[in-house]
Image (cartoon, rainbow, N blue to C red):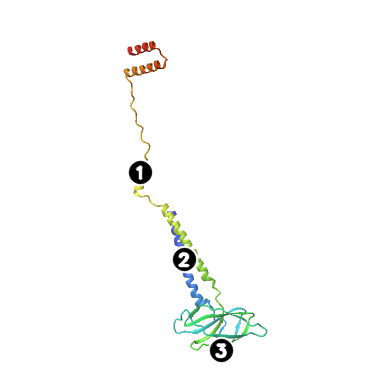
Amino acid sequence: MKRRSGPRIAVVGAILTLVAAVVGFIATLILNAFVLDAYHAYGEVAIPGSTSLHLPAGEVTVSFHTAVTGSPSSGFPIPDLKFNVTPPAGVPKPEVTESIGGTTTVNSDTHVRVWVMRVAQEGTYGIETDGAVNGYISPRLAFGHGSSYGWLPWAFGGLFVLGLVELFAAMFWSAKSAKRARPLAPEELLSFDEPTAGPPPLQTVPTYTPSDQGVRLEQLKQLAALRDSGALTDAEFEAEKRRILET
């Protein structure tokens, strides 16, 4: 019983691992889209428009935001945009690199990452924006940072793969254990009940006791052979022959 309960526990454990991986992966995607992705951390600037933002040193994401009335398509169009950053006195201008990200919609607000900006020193920076945004509702650029929990989907993906490996191993163990514990078929039981066939019994050979006449004939044959070989003379042969016949 203990042998069969082990594989069952392993299968249940593997299934629970897979469920936890799937639930965690979906929850992480939702949190990254709605909670963890703090794209608006430092402020927003209307397009066209200008303002001053306090930016920390390090990487800053620049995302395009607009309001939508329906569900945007996967290929959300990004208009022709541009912005200019004026750093504080004595601070080098931030390095800007284009980095188009995926489109996310939260409460009718669609945003997509367009640039990544490398800020050399913390301070207050002047931001000026412009672009061909006719037809967009409340267009703006948001300055923030990406999620610091981007590793979570990978972690749950790895957990899912681990669960699959555990499930295959547990199923193999269960099949092997079931084969080892398989009950014998009726014909197999009958074969065990039947006695093992051994060598056939030896047959007794009936004993044969020769008669007196047969003994005399055998003795006469031996005498004739001795005479023919020269061991007996004719006289000796006749004398022995008479003696055998007279007994």
Name the residue beneath numbered marker 2: 18
Work out whether mark 2 precedes mark 3 in sequence or the reverse, and give the earlier one.
2
Question: Circle 2 sits in a helix, a strand or a loop, which is it?
Answer: helix
At x 54%, y 71%, the residue is: 151
Determine the CA span between mark 1 and mark 3. Answer: 97 Å
CB-based contact (under 8 Å), mark 1 and mark 3: no
Name the residue beneath numbered marker 1: 193
Q: Nearer the viewer, mark 2 or mark 3?
A: 3
Tell me: residue 198, above or below residue 4: above
Name the residue beneath numbered marker 3: 49
Q: Is residue 31 visible?
A: yes
The kind of residue on which mark 2 rests is: Leu
Tell me: residue 23, above or below residue 57: above
CB-based contact (under 8 Å), mark 1 and mark 2: no
Residue nearer the viewer, 28 or 71? 71
Determine the CA span between mark 2 and mark 3. Answer: 49 Å
At x 48%, y 72%, the residue is: 27
Q: Is residue 6 visible?
A: no
At x 46%, y 60%, the residue is: 168
**Location of residue 237 (image quadrant):** top left
Q: Quadrant of the C terminus?
A: top left
Expressed as whole percent of the image width and height from the top left, the position of residue 190 reads 34, 45
Q: Residues within 10 Å of mark 2 (few under 14, many from 20)?
A: many
The kind of residue on which mark 3 rests is: Gly
Tell me: residue 167, above or below residue 40: above
